[in-house]
């Protein structure tokens, strides 16, 4: 059985690999499928689908089924990662199998990006006020076609010699409470779930361990989102310890949620995270994707 990776980012948000490059790496890693889940945008999906078709039709770069020794196709799952806000914590909802032409969903994501633009303009003002002149126009010139995030500001600071590395950029300027940080208005996760469903997708709670909520608050979050229609939860993730994985799987079982998983690959922006394998030990079996597909099919038929 081959592996899959259901949480990845490209140059259309804060990753450093194009959708085409992502697909090529996925084939080299012998993955059966990847989901492109850029932040608050579906703009890269069409490019990823075309790249996937090209690879599968040419047969040159195709993966190999280890059981049969035959070349096997790779699959691209259209997805997105939506930034939301719950009880003073930023919570991300991944949508998988979304219709990237759905007008309601595209409008919802456009509003999300608009709020990000407003935040980025204020971040530029904050940097300028502390003696690091950065204009929003400069950021657009340096990162065309991207949904600009704090990772882009960190990259800019490194490239222009203001800090030694991205970690220093966040620690000194970009983390909450630091001089350039600006809180962004975000939607409720329940609203994100609603729009993902409207676009024909399934809604997954991304990397719940990363929210550092404590057991009681985490369970309250999952319970509330399950009531709102949450379909699954990321139980397999690059930075999880074995105990983390066990905890999330137990919660998934308790609240009847599907399991999902992904590396959260960002290319050079997270150099310690590899596509498919995370920090080296990640393995998301293809059966995880099969179960998600079967569930989606069953809900469509009702």
Image (cartoon, rainbow, N blue to C red):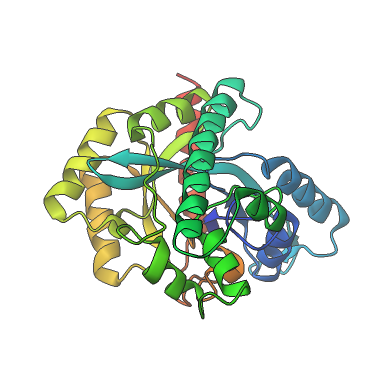
Instruction: Tell me if residue 121 can be seen.
Output: yes
Q: Position of residue 260 (x, y in %)?
A: 42, 51
As drawn, which residue projects farthest toward the left?
216
As drawn, which residue projects farthest toward the bottom?
164
Q: Position of residue 298 (x, y in %)?
A: 46, 28
Give the answer, above or below, for where 221 lies relative to 227.
below
Which quarter of the rendered picture does the N terminus lie within? bottom right
Q: Position of residue 74 (x, y in %)?
A: 69, 55
Residue shown at the point (37%, 70%) measured from the top left? 171
Q: Is residue 232 left or right of residue 45?
A: left
- 279 or 129, which lies in front? 129
- 236 or 149, which lies in front? 149
Query: Residue 246's image quarter?
Result: bottom left
- 229 or 18, which lies in front? 18
Query: Residue 267's image quarter?
Result: bottom right
Residue shown at the point (24%, 68%) measured from the top left? 243
Q: How many marks?
A: 0
Residue shown at the point (49%, 72%) measured from the top left? 166
Give the answer, above or below, for where 102 lies relative to 258.
above
Residue shown at the point (61%, 30%) measured from the top left? 99
Give the answer, above or below, for where 54 lies relative to 65.
above
Q: Position of residue 254 (x, y in %)?
A: 20, 44
Which quarter of the rendered picture does the C terminus lie within? top left
Instruction: Tell me if residue 68 can be seen.
Output: no
């Amino acid at each position: 059985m081959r592996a899959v990776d259901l949480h990845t980012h490209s140059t259309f948000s804060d990753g450093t690999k194009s959708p085409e490059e992502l697909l090529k790496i996925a084939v080299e890693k012998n993955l059966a499928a990847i989901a492109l889940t850029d932040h608050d945008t579906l703009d890269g999906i069409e490019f990823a689908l075309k790249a996937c078709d090209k690879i599968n039709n040419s047969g040159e770069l195709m993966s190999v089924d280890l059981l049969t020794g035959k070349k096997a196709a790779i699959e691209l799952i259209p997805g997105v990662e939506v930034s939301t806000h719950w009880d003073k914590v930023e919570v991300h909802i991944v949508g998988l199998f979304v219709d990237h032409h759905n007008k309601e969903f595209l409008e919802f994501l456009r509003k999300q990006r608009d709020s990000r633009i407003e935040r980025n303009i204020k971040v530029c003002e904050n940097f300028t006020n502390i003696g690091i002149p950065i204009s929003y126009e400069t950021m657009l010139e340096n990162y065309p076609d991207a949904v600009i995030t704090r990772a882009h500001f960190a990259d800019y600071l490194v490239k222009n010699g203001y800090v030694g590395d991205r970690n220093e950029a966040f620690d000194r300027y970009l983390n909450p409470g630091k001089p350039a940080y600006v809180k962004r208005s975000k939607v409720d996760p329940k609203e994100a779930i609603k729009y993902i469903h409207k676009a024909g997708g399934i809604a997954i709670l991304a990397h719940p361990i990363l929210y550092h909520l404590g057991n009681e608050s985490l369970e309250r979050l999952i319970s509330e989102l399950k009531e709102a229609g949450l379909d699954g939860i990321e139980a397999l993730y690059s930075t999880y310890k074995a105990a983390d994985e066990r905890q999330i799987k137990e919660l998934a079982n308790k609240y009847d949620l599907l399991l999902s998983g992904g590396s959260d690959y960002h290319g050079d922006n997270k150099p310690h995270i590899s596509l498919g394998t995370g920090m080296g030990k990640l393995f998301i079996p293809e059966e995880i994707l099969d179960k998600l597909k079967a569930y989606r099919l069953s809900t469509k038929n009702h």
